[in-house]
Image (tube, rainbow, N blue to C red):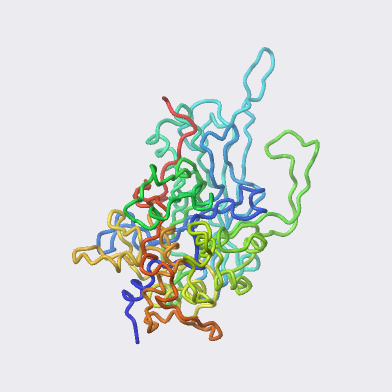
Amino acid sequence: MKLKPASIAKGCLLMAVAGAAIASSHREAPFITTTPKVDGTDFYMFRSYEGVATNGTGGRSDYVTLIANYQPLQGPYGGPNYFSMDPNALYEIHVDNNGDAREDITFQFRFNNKLNSVALPIGNQNVQIPLIQAGTVSSINDPNLNLNESYSLTVVRGDRRKGSIQTVAASLPKPVDYIGQKTLGDAAAYKAYADKHIHTVNIPGCSMPAKVFVGQRQEGFAVNLGRIFDLVNAPVEVLLNPALKDAEGANGNHYIQKQNVTSLALEVHTSCLTTGSETVIGGWTTASLRQARLLNGAPQSGHQASEKAGGAWTQVSRLGNPLVNEVVIGLGDKDKFNASAPKDDGQFLTYVSNPTLPALLGLVLAGNPAAVAPTNLPRTDLLTTFLTGITGVNKPANPTPSEMLRLNTAVPPVPFASQNRLGVAGNALNTDVNKVNDNAGFPNGRRPKDDVVDIALVAVLGGLCVINGDNDALKLNSVPGVPSLTSACKPSSVPLGAQSANIHDAVDQAVVPFLPAFPYLNTPNPGSSNL
């Protein structure tokens, strides 16, 4: 039986790789909690929808936007140093454009923090101020800034450490974090200031110019974070009733929307990312630190002068699909996953084939691990997506099993107002004959509006097997290329039955504010207001 892409999409029910779970990657591994400046929180990759028509043409539709977020849960009030990036770190966005689970293109970001040593005359002495600003700020490298952040951008083709490296930009200014309204004005004024830091750059080997922005943004990921980690502190009757979603109220608690993150955003022409006839690209982001550091107990005056870093780059953070490490990988292997590469993901296979999250949900919601956990083990429904991408949606022609976010660049983008928050499957389930067709969302890449939490929960609790039916309509009883892995992925293997399609986390991604254009994520929350 040959299935059409729309049928595949309907069956996928927003299937998420690796059984990705119920939040995004915030403080997801033991070591990374000690180095929050290199903690990757979210990764987005989507066809740019700025200015596109309902048929997916025009505007910036020929471009792909890649956004890597770092430094989770930034309290906007967190001064006086706020959230500058680490000059001793290497931040990277990787693209695999031939399905072999190895990076073919890597964009590297390195940061430089320049202390200006602004001083005030106090009596007969000039004394350095203790803040990073000496007055209001409105321009690039404003003279009132006591600390200027800048970054370099390079592109590597081939292996990230052994490939051909070329400079895209040697020094680009980064906006200061949104200290508050007295320093930087209201939200409109800060947006105008930040927009001055959207740079047009030329990538060697690419005939079309790209855009880059690095700066603080409002946290855009909707998740009931506190209640979820408190043993899913919400009634079952709420979680299984989609009508009881709210952004902030009796059921929802979207606390992290009050926080900020730092975004590394690129907009690159599609032709610069794909190769040959392959239209599917894979992407992930990593951060690395030097292998060794020396701490000086008597540092010289300066900025971040206590540390001397050296040695080889050592990867400490990795993120492709939302939340593989946070709630799928076992606690003892979380640091190991953060240091790993997609080509080596076979070592984590058991966490996906025999996931613990469904049993944990059954335990805390019903006092019985078997109450909601699907019985088709190994979970071939999750493994298929985790390993290869989805046939007819975002599976490359010759995939190597690996975990990464995959985007089919041949699928046209959809204007923000018409996007289905449930992505590909939501589009397939929408029977309105006048609908705007939308196959451009998660798991075909990831847009800011895509409600990946609800999508993932449906997949983890067996929604795919309900749709797969007794006759393996979606071919989920086995894993392509891994004939030893088979299971009976069918409705009788799902304790929740059809209710598995109703599961949600009580907050609504669709109501989160975003920008209509690059860099898409919203202006950050201010550290203070004029109230």
Image location of residue 209, percent across then percent down: 43, 58
Residue at the far left: name it: 434
Q: Give above or below for 269 relative to 117.
A: below
201 horizontally vs 498: left or right: right
- Horizontal and vertical percent position of residue 79: 57, 33
Residue at the image position 64 percent from the left and 60 percent from the top: 331
Please name the residue shown 46% across and 49% down the image.
Answer: 224
Q: Residue 399: x percent and y percent?
A: 50, 78
Is residue 121 or residue 322 the one in the foreground?
Answer: 322
Which of 231 and 416 lies nearest the eye of the viewer?
Answer: 231
Q: Is residue 266 visible?
A: yes
- 69 horizontally vs 279: left or right: right
Q: Quadrant of the N terminus?
A: bottom left
Image quarter hosting the C terminus: top left
Q: Quadrant of residue 340?
A: bottom right
Q: Is residue 224 left or right of residue 133?
A: left
Does residue 67 lie above or below 141 as drawn? Answer: below
Extreme-top residue of the structure = 123
Q: Position of residue 267 (x, y in %)?
A: 43, 57
Task: Kindly give the residue lying farthest to the front in the view shown.
Answer: 367
Residue found at the far right of this picture: 297
Please identify the quarter of the rendering in which residue 159 is found: bottom right
The number of callouts visible is 0
Picture residue at 29% right of the left edge, 63% below the top: 56
Residue closer to the observer: 461 or 328: 461
**Vertical placement of residue 149 versus 50, above or below:** above
Q: Is residue 105 above or below residue 66?
A: below
Residue 272 visible in this rendered orientation of the protein: no
